[in-house]
Image (cartoon, rainbow, N blue to C red):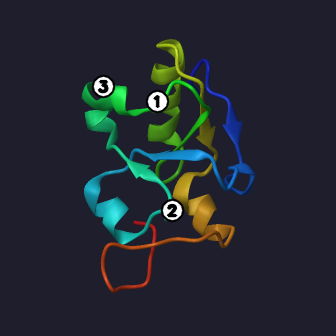
Amino acid sequence: MFANVPEVNATEVPADGYLLDVRENDEWAAGHAPAAVHIPLGELNARAGEVPRDREVYVVCRAGGRSGQAVAALNNAGWTTVNVAGGMQSWHGAGLDMAADTDAEPRVI
């Protein structure tokens, strides 16, 4: 789909890995990985300096498309990033921990 986009399954993201969520604010609020850092894709160019360069970064969106774009751009600019295949849909499907910014049950929208 994109050049320079390595992928891992959600279950392969290390527990101490840096997980970057590039979904929109409403998607994040509905449900996200508890330790993830949120920078919407549309803000990533302006906020790229917040993404560490000294470690591997795992990037996630809802299904893998937007995170694939982010991984390609970041890797081409010198970062070491990996796409989470299937995004938060796969994360949720694998039964991995999720949190929400509301009292509702975390979900992927």
Q: Which residue is mark 2?
A: 33
Image vertical order of residue 94 relative to residue 104, above or below = above
Image vertical order of residue 99 relative to residue 41, above or below = below
Mark positioned earlier in the residue sequence (3 or 2): 2
Instruction: Say which amino acid is labelled 2.
Output: Ala
Instruction: Say which amino acid is labelled 1.
Output: Gln
- Relative horizontal placement of residue 50, taking residue 60 as reference (left or right): left
Image vertical order of residue 71 relative to residue 97, above or below = above
SS for callout 2: loop
Q: Which residue is mark 1?
A: 69
Comparing labels 1 and 3, the label whose residue is closer to the camera = 3
- Relative horizontal placement of residue 38, taking residue 8 as reference (left or right): left
Query: Of 44 and 49, which appears nearest the observer?
Result: 49
Instruction: Say which amino acid is labelled 3.
Output: Asn
**Identity of the residue drawn at 30% across and 79% down:** 102
Q: Which residue is mark 3?
A: 45
